[in-house]
Amino acid sequence: MAHRTLAAAVAAAAILSVAATAAPAVGSSNRWAHAAAGTVFLPNPVQQLGDESLIDAKDADYAALAPAYRRVTLSHLDGSGTLTGQYVAVKSSTGAAARTVDGAFPAWHRDADQFEQVMGYYWVTSAQEYLQHLGFGSALRPVNERQIALRVDQYGGDNSFFRGDKANITVGKGGVDDAEDGEVVVHEYGHSVQDGQVPGFGTTLESGAIGEAFGDYLAVVVTSWRAGAPTKTPEACVADWDSTSYTRTVPHCLRRLDGTKTYPADVVGEVHADGEIWSRALWDIRRALGDTKASTLIVEAQFAFAPDTTFRAAALDTVAAAQRLYGSSAAKAVTAAFHARGIL
Ligand SMILES: [Ca+2]
Ligand SMILES: [Ca+2]
Ligand SMILES: [Ca+2]
Ligand SMILES: [Zn+2]
């Protein structure tokens, strides 16, 4: 199994390098036409194995986790042998920088710092590839097609965050190392995406809540797209693995997309909690229209958001994007999703 995946990766790399040699120069894009195999969770062991009893065990690599490691292809690399690529450059302050050996990244497991570096690279790049598969950067305008920095930091708190410099991501190592959960990485990239669309987005409680909600939504849709559905844990559950460190109830979820909160009754004045009002609307839009249409109109709508937008204004922008892209029946479904939350 691992061999076949590796062989496929090597074949893909060979095709890419042939294309890079044979094709005429197309600006600077050839610089990123490199690929290498790497080992990841797809997206996290709790979701992959359907096992809610897995625990951090102080970053140990124990037998029950073994089936969750997957050999995948890391794409859009610069060919330097480091985790430097078109959409993300990984920096680590906790261990030596990952480097390829004979053209592939060694099969590091979770007890090696380099595992989180590979995870950060793979999941940011996967999220950008998801946006491109929707048509952003081809039929639609590009979304966040810049190289961001992803830092793996050793601070104690269990809270990855999106820095004041906006584009970039820092993942921490509290509890389960944050970058061991692909959904945490993609959530953080969601903030970068919104900042790429609307510089400085998220200056108020409601716009901040929309930011948290979109990160949660993106985490689920990107990981389902890449790893496949149905999932072995509820698809609406975000960060099944990272959350084993700080939740008691099963299934372990940092948050869910399918909650029942409504506006304004359930507003508590905290962006993550209030975000669950917005993310449920996004979840309902996806259930009504399917992944591709829902994600396309949700992301397209965000270009129109003000940095300090309100739930109501952003919902109206989202209805308008649905109408523009897919017509009246889609706009009606989007309106219904926001109406059910008390937003419209
Ligand atoms: Ca680790
Ligand atoms: Ca953590
Ligand atoms: Ca999940
Ligand atoms: Zn966040």
Image: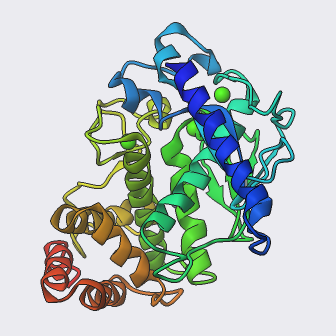
Q: Is residue 249 left or right of residue 340?
A: right
Q: Where on the picture, by quarter, is residue 265?
A: bottom left
Q: Is residue 164 left or right of residue 246?
A: right
Q: Nearer the viewer, residue 1 or 290?
A: 1
Q: Is residue 288 left or right of residue 141?
A: left
Residue under the point 39% across and 86% down: 310
Above or below, 134 relative to 33? below
Above or below, 144 relative to 183? below
Q: Position of residue 211 (x, y in %)?
A: 48, 70
Above or below, 118 relative to 236? above
Is residue 76 visible from the viewing direction of this image? no
Q: Position of residue 60 (x, y in %)?
A: 62, 15
Furthest-top residue in view?
A: 63
Residue under the point 74% across and 41% down: 155
Q: Is residue 219 left or right of residue 25?
A: left
Image-quarter location of ligand 1: top right
Q: Where on the picture, by quarter, is residue 73?
A: top right
Q: Quadrant where the C terminus lies?
A: bottom left
Count of numbered badges drawn on the protein: 0
Q: Position of residue 206 (x, y in %)?
A: 42, 78
Residue under the point 15% across and 79% down: 339
Q: How is the image coloured?
A: rainbow
Q: Where on the picture, by quarter, is residue 11?
A: top right
Is residue 113 visible from the viewing direction of this image? yes
Furthest-front residue in view?
A: 22
Residue under the point 56% across and 75% down: 143
Q: Position of residue 186 (x, y in %)?
A: 53, 53
Q: Nearer the viewer, residue 28 or 336?
A: 28
